[in-house]
Image (cartoon, helix red, strand yellow):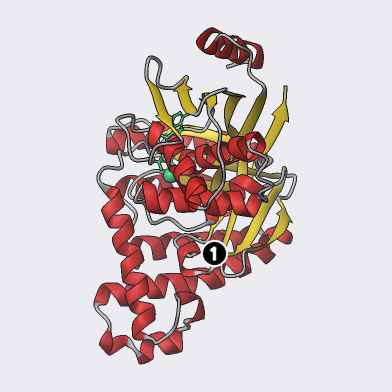
Amino acid sequence: MPVDLFNTKFEQLYKKPAEALASAPGRVNLIGEFTDYNNGFVLPCALEFTTRILFRKRDDNQVIVHSLHYPGECDKFSIDDEISRGDSQWGNYIRAVAYVLKRQGHLLSGVDLLIDSTVPQGSGLSSSAALEVAVGGVFNHLCQLNLSGEEIALLGQEAENDFMNCQCGIMDQLVSANGQKGQALLIDCQSLTTESVAIPEDLSIVIVNSNYPRKLVDSEYNQRRIDCEQAAKKMSIATLRDADIKKLNAARSAMSDNEYKRAHHVITENSRVIKATQALKNNDMPKLRELMTASHQSLRDDFEVTVPETDGLVDICQEALGDEGAVRMTGGGFGGAIVCLCRHSDIDKIKSAVEKHYFSRFNIQASIYVGKAGDGLQVTVL
Ligand code: ADP
Ligand code: MG
């Protein structure tokens, strides 16, 4: 929605104009999947798709939330009461952030909020992290908490882990908080240090959402994390960050097949992230292609988080691009999206191949987004 209309909508709902706007982006992960919660490496970029929240401080301690995506539904809670889950599914993300802020001892105040977003929901572009980081930005500004982007990201992750019961790592929130226009962000999830890596001017990021419905996946997702933790334990190391193939093979007999395969993915994926960072710096498409193909295969065979729809989309797009592109699934898996790196002139090849082959093979329509690396969290006073 255009800014002026968005403001008008706020005023209609709350009878007063908004004071400020917080905006946080979704993200696409170029490579480094399921490595973040193993303290490894990831290479995502923030997108120009953002979640925006208009807000205004209230005189009481109520938090009142509307989202343009859920018209007619409003969530309300008091920051004086113990914050627990409410009836609004999406409202819980706002409660979650308020809950962790309160738990850390921050003094919060009441606020009117209106959410709008261009981040597709449930597509693996992390609309949930965009929402958590934007809400973190709101309270940071409103209550003068002086939190850094990294601190807001950690709060968002805690909100998702402890309140929403999804055991995600730090990648999504950190890149949503600290991403930079035109740059990918290499994150060392152990130290949380980051390095910006310019995305070559002639490279396009095309995201194809399989639109395969991700059902009941939280338990699968959380089980992967448990498998990784168990594998690390059996190698007598703190996290899989400290693992290598030698240690893995030495502990193989103590591990279940799944623990072995999950750890094998993480170890090989970490090394692919480092190599892919160099390949991106060199604008080396053949290398990116080799690494992204290997990443996808590892996610399919070792980590077992792909579905025939995302495997099929990767095949369709890779075949259309030939040597001129690199393709893999991206995000939390079990459906969701794939990411293609290609030259601008080849975007149409992806579009026509997906149109021609995907629906006829899988009986669902895909959605295609041409992504650009955008900025992280921003808060603007109106
Ligand atoms: P993903 O993060 O991959 O987009 P999730 O299932 O983790 O998928 O998060 C999607 C959820 O985040 C939605 O179901 C909704 O609860 C919340 N959400 C995301 N964007 C918005 C929005 N614009 N308004 C309200 N809730 C939103
Ligand atoms: Mg999410």
User: Measured from the top left, where is residue 139 in percent x and y?
Assistant: 59, 37
Q: Quadrant of ligand 1?
A: top left
Taking depth in this image into account, of 349 and 6 the one nearest to the observer is 6
Q: Is residue 78 visible?
A: yes
What residue lies at 26% left-to-right and 42% top-to-bottom? Answer: 215
**Mark 1 neighbour density, 10 Å: few (under 14) some (14–19) many (20 or more):** many
Question: In the shown orientation, is residue 344 left or right of residue 227?
Answer: right
Question: In the shown orientation, is residue 194 left or right of residue 109?
Answer: right
Q: How many marks overall?
A: 1
What residue lies at 27% left-to-right and 89% top-to-bottom? Answer: 253
Question: In the shown orientation, is residue 195 left or right of residue 341?
Answer: right
Mark 1 lies on residue: 291
Q: Is residue 44 above or below residue 299?
A: above
Q: Quadrant of residue 18?
A: top right
Specify the amino acid type for callout 1: Leu
User: Measured from the top left, where is residue 71 in percent x and y?
Assistant: 40, 16
Question: In the shown orientation, is residue 264 left or right of residue 190?
Answer: left
Q: Is residue 1 above or below residue 371?
A: above
Q: Is mark 1 within 8 Å of ligand 1?
A: no
What residue lies at 53% left-to-right and 51% top-to-bottom? Answer: 105
The C terminus sits in image quarter: top right
Q: Is residue 326 visible?
A: no
* SS label for mark 1: helix
Q: Is residue 67 above or below residue 206?
A: above
The N terminus sits in image quarter: top right
User: Measured from the top left, where is residue 136 in percent x and y?
Assistant: 57, 41
Q: Is residue 248 above or below residue 122?
A: below
Q: Quadrant of residue 227?
A: bottom left
User: Measured from the top left, where is residue 358 in percent x and y?
Assistant: 36, 37
What residue lies at 45% left-to-right and 80% top-to-bottom? Answer: 238
